[in-house]
Image (tube, rainbow, N blue to C red):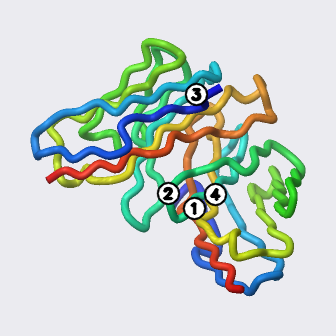
Amino acid sequence: KNEVEQSPQNLTAQEGEFITINCSYSVGISALHWLQQHPGGGIVSLFMLSSGKKKHGRLIATINIQEKHSSLHITASHPRDSAVYICAVLIQGAQKLVFGQGTRLTINP
Amino acid sequence: NAGVTQTPKFRILKIGQSMTLQCAQDMNHNYMYWYRQDPGMGLKLIYYSVGAGITDKGEVPNGYNVSRSTTEDFPLRLELAAPSQTSVYFCASTPRPGMDMNTEAFFGQGTRLTVV
């Protein structure tokens, strides 16, 4: 079983819809990252969380440490949001950054 | 700051050849990582380092070696390249938690390696 599980693996939605991507992990962590990978392959960091909630523009990330769960929300989704979204956790102790398998998001106009 | 600089962007190797992928960061990050991403798959951790002089194996270390002689540099060495090492390689760095909790992870632009 992977230490980091994301759901759904694939998500297709219409422009304007509210999007939620979930990440569950099974280990103790120091921090959790949400990343975005575009079709060109480059990876950019969206958020780093250790508790609570962060917001940047139309993106909101939350984390519940007790439940070992994080969510990434996109409000008013747009075709340019189409990408693979990846959850990664920094494992406590070992301090290695381990990735989920990613969620491929497609937003249709 | 340049962030994470990864070279080369593309490389074709023949079976049995060796090469070094370079990774450098100028943000004084303690933690650095090497990943590989096979087509349509997620990123798998090859090696990582939590500071100069310290390296550890990740999920898929076989066929690779690393060194971390300075905080800035974290090269990945492929010895005796094999077709199974055909992949896209990413280097990443993060600060140590607690040092700067508002800083995200930074990634190199990737190296597309083909072994023929």
Q: CA distance from mark 4 to mark 1?
A: 6 Å
Q: Earlier in the sequence, mark 2 or mark 4?
A: 4
Amino acid of disc 4: Gln
Mark 2: which secondary structure?
A: loop
Marks 2 and 1: in contact by CB < 8 Å? yes
Amino acid of disc 2: Gly
Q: Nearer the viewer, mark 2 or mark 4?
A: 2
> Looking at the picture, does residue A75 appear above or below residue A5?
below
Q: Using the image, tell me which numbered label, if any, was put on residue B31.
A: 3
Q: Between residues B100 and B114, which one lies in front from this camera angle?
A: B114
Q: Which residue is mark 2?
A: A41
User: What is the chain identity of the residue bearing mark 2?
Assistant: A
Q: Residue at x 64, y 23 (%)?
A: B27
Q: CA distance from mark 2 to mark 4?
A: 10 Å
Q: Residues within 10 Å of mark 2 (few under 14, many from 20)?
A: some
Q: Between residues A66 and A20, which one lies in front from this camera angle?
A: A20
Classify residue B92 as left or right of residue B15.
right
Q: Residues within 10 Å of mark 4 (few under 14, many from 20)?
A: many
The answer to which quarter of the image holds residue A58 is bottom right
Residue B47, image x, y percentages: 42, 35
Q: Residues within 10 Å of mark 3 (few under 14, many from 20)?
A: many
Q: Residues within 10 Å of mark 1 (few under 14, many from 20)?
A: some
Residue A77, image x, y percentages: 79, 75
Q: Which residue is mark 1?
A: A38
Residue A101, image x, y percentages: 53, 62
Marks 4 and 2: in contact by CB < 8 Å? no
Q: Residue at x 57, y 51 (%)?
A: A43
